[in-house]
Amino acid sequence: MDPKMIAWASGLFEGEGTVRRKLEIEMTDKDVISKFWGIMNCGNVYYRERPNVKPTWRWAVGNKYDVIKCLTLMLPFFGNRRAYQALNILDSLELV
C-alpha cells in the first residue's frame, strides 16, 4: 500500500470518522468516500437520503479483523486524541 494514500485516508478519517467498535465516515462527497473505500479495501459504502438534507454516503466497517486492519494502518498518522481512541478499541477487540 502506498504510504501517501494511507496518510491521506488517515487524515480524512481523523477529521470525519467515527471510532467505536466499528468505524464510519459519512459525508456528501461520493468520490471521497469511494477513494477512501478503495484505499482501505474493506467495509461497505451506503447511500442515505433524508428529507430536507443533502444525500450522504457512508463507509462503515464492523468486522473485527477489518477494524483492526484499518486502525493499524492509520494509527501512525493519527494525532494524540484519535490515536488514544484507536488504541483503546484495538485493546478491547484483541481481548474479545
Image (cartoon, rainbow, N blue to C red):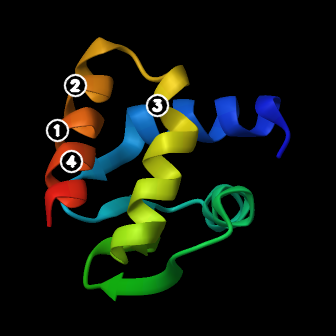
Q: Are marks 1 and 2 in contact (CB under 8 Å)?
A: yes
Q: Can you tell which mark lies on residue 20? A: none
Identify the element where label 4 is drawn: helix
Residue 73 showing in the rendered view: yes
Q: Helix, strand, or loop for circle 2?
A: helix
Position in image of residue 43 (x %, y %): 51, 76
Between the C-alphas of marks 1 and 4, the distance is 4 Å
Give amino acid for label 2: Tyr
Q: Which residue is mark 4?
A: 89
Which residue appears at 80% of the width and 29% of the height? 4
Lower position in the chain sequence, tag 4 or tag 3: 3
Marks 4/2: CA–CA distance:
9 Å
Q: Are marks 1 and 4 in contact (CB under 8 Å)?
A: yes
Q: Residues within 10 Å of mark 2 (few under 14, many from 20)?
A: few
Mark 3 secondary-structure assignment: helix
Distance Cα–Cα, label 1 vs label 3: 12 Å
Q: Specify whether 7 is left or right of 24.
A: right
Which residue is under mark 2?
84
Above or below 74: residue 60: below
